[in-house]
Image: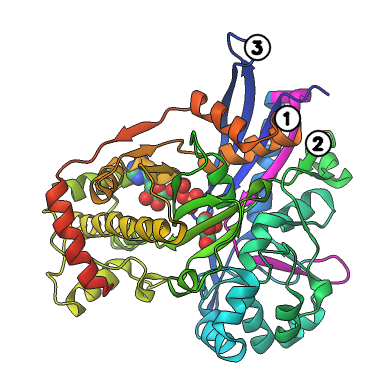
């Protein structure tokens, strides 16, 4: 087997894609180039059943199989390995017979409403933060498990193992169960110092330690396609490896930074803004500001904060589509560009926006509640969202600097959201620093790179990032209209009450 190409499956909350990564030799002996070819893209539409929102996990498995089939048809024996990354926190429960128990919940389902508050009152926020280093989000795995214990004790009694979404899909492909570290770190049950499950937290929550498998590093062999999958698809037993299986961990791998101190924004359904560090920041200030220390590839820490991101645009578009308007993302961006600047701002991270049902109405209600002009047209609403996101990026970047004592020259942006060049421009303006936008398929590229690291092509992230830098375009946005944005930032801070 000549291992020259790899298959990355990257599942976002909005859509999934399968990408083949290939390495080619440039002019000199050290001149490697990475290229990628998207071979499959599919929507990831959650399904509502009764009161609850679930992922369509078997459909995702079906799409992954289609991707494997296409990859083998294209690459034949050259295909060296396969890996999956996905959104964080969600999981499937497996019974003692090895079967999946029920459909995994979507993290935006309301079954966790109020549960975080209850668990924090019982265990203490300080204690949970010291034991996990994680930000408090109501959908973290820890609160989903507490919700299931209260609401479906029978299910929890039958659960033998918990597998995070990529672990689960890998299990379906290989028959082997493993837990991958970067995604395990998003559960809020993993200790950021010992990098293993926090026994105290598990015990206080009444969770059996045997529910969770020991977290494994990214970049190791975690099985091969099972005989059943090989027979079904007519493909050979290709190795399946672990990567940074949390999509944000993979996105951070793909940041084409030159040095070790850089700020990034992974820009998709969510906006994840922060920096890469050798160790977690577990200070009181990090807790108060609700920052997170997630596990990164090669033992790094991702100090970052979740910002609601382009979910606000996606959901607005969905509401307008239901009402019969069919504007594409580029058309919505164009409408926003034509709308008046700096009219109203929202805090993108207000709880009202987590899953409001009708996003434009939620945005309008926020503006009315805060005594601002209420945006009406599609362009006005999207303008309000994009300006508010850019201003929130500045707010979080400045806090990241205060937590780390570092100063960043600019911001790297990766992910599907950088196709929104208005947002990139606004961000450079709000920050009053340059934005370097690229690559678009950050998570898929990070996934590919770690597969190549598993194959021994690179030893360090630094080397891999050098190749990413020379292989994919990066567009620079320089700040303009500095005064207008500085004044807008002051108003924005007043509105969000910080
Ligand atoms: P995820 O991986 O979380 O599903 P992506 O990284 O694919 O998300 O980013 C999806 C978002 O990118 C969409 O919500 C949309 O706002 C934005 N987007 C995608 N394509 C375009 C485009 N052509 N123009 C503007 N925005 C776009
Ligand atoms: C982005 C992401 C993010 C998590 C959220 C649940 O796709 O993985 O890092 O907080 O989804």
Q: The residue tagged with tag 3: helix, strand or loop?
A: loop
Q: Earlier in the sequence, mark 3 or mark 1?
A: 3
Q: The residue tagged with tag 2: helix, strand or loop?
A: loop
Q: Residue at x 48, y 27 (%)?
A: 472
Q: How is the image coloured?
A: rainbow
Residue wearing tag 3 = 29
Q: Residue at x 76, y 32 (%)?
A: 455
On the image, the x and y values in percent for residue 240 come to: 77, 42
- Judge: label 2 CB < 8 Å from ligand 1: no
Residue wearing tag 1 = 72
On the image, the x and y values in percent for residue 20 come to: 62, 31
Residues at marks 2 and 1 touching, judged by CB atoms closer than 8 Å: yes
Q: Examine the rendering and report whether any part of residue 309 can be seen.
A: no
Q: Residue at x 33, y 33 (%)?
A: 476
| The C terminus - image quarter | bottom left
Let me know if residue 116 is in the magenta part: no
Residue wearing tag 2 = 238
Q: Which residues are magenta?
A: 75-99
On the image, the x and y values in percent for residue 440 come to: 45, 38
**Which numbered disc, 2 or 1, marks the residue closer to the eye?**
2
Q: Residues within 10 Å of mark 3 (few under 14, many from 20)?
A: few
Give the left or right position of residue 183, taking residue 397 as reference.
right
**Which numbered disc, 3 or 1, marks the residue closer to the eye?**
3
Let me know if residue 92 is in the magenta part: yes
Q: Earlier in the sequence, mark 2 or mark 1?
A: 1
């Amino acid at each position: 087997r000549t291992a020259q190409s790899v298959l990355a499956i990257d599942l976002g909350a909005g859509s999934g894609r399968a990408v083949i990564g290939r390495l080619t030799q440039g002019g000199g002996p050290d001149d490697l180039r990475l290229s990628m070819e998207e071979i499959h893209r599919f929507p990831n539409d959650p399904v509502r059943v009764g009161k609850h929102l679930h992922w369509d996990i078997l459909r995702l498995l079906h799409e992954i199989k289609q991707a494997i089939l296409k990859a083998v048809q294209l690459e034949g024996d050259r295909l060296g390995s396969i890996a999956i990354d996905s959104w964080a926190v969600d999981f499937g429960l497996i019974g003692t017979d090895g079967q999946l128990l029920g459909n995994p919940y979507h993290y935006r389902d309301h079954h966790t409403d109020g549960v975080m508050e209850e668990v924090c009152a019982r265990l203490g926020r300080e204690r949970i933060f010291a034991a996990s280093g994680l930000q408090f989000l109501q959908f973290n795995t820890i609160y989903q498990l507490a919700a299931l214990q209260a609401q479906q004790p029978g299910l929890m009694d039958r659960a033998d193992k918990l597998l995070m979404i990529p672990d689960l899909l890998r299990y379906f492909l290989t028959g082997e169960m493993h837990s991958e570290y970067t995604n395990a770190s998003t559960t809020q049950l993993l200790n950021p110092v010992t990098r293993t499950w926090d026994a105290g937290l598990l015990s206080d929550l009444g969770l059996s330690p045997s529910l969770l498998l020991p977290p494994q590093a990214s970049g190791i062999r975690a099985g091969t396609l099972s005989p059943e999958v090989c027979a079904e698809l007519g493909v050979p037993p290709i190795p399946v490896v672990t990567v940074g299986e949390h999509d944000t961990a993979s996105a951070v791998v793909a940041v084409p930074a030159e040095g070790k101190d850089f700020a990034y924004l992974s820009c998709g359904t969510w906006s994840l803004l922060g920096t890469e560090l050798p160790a977690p920041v577990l200070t009181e200030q990090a807790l108060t500001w609700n920052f997170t220390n997630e596990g990164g590839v090669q033992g790094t820490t991702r100090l970052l904060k979740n910002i609601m991101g382009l979910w606000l645009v996606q959901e607005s578009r969905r509401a307008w589509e239901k009402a019969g308007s069919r504007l594409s993302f580029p058309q919505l961006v164009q409408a926003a560009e034509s709308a008046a600047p700096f009219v109203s701002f929202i805090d993108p991270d207000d709880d009202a926006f987590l899953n409001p049902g009708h996003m434009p109405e939620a945005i309008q209600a926020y503006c009315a509640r805060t005594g601002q002009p209420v945006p009406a047209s599609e362009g006005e609403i999207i303008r309000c969202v994009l300006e508010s996101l850019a201003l929130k990026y500045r707010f979080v970047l400045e806090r990241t600097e205060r937590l780390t004592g570092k100063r960043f020259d600019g911001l790297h942006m990766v992910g599907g959201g950088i196709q929104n060049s208005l947002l990139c421009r606004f961000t450079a303006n709000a920050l009053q620093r340059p934005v370097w936008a690229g690559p678009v398929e950050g998570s898929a590229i990070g996934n590919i790179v770690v597969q190549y690291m598993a194959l021994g092509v690179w030893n360090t992230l630094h080397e891999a990032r050098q190749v990413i830098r020379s292989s994919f375009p990066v567009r620079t946005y320089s700040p303009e209209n500095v005064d207008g944005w500085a004044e807008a930032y002051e108003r924005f801070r007043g509105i969000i009450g910080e």
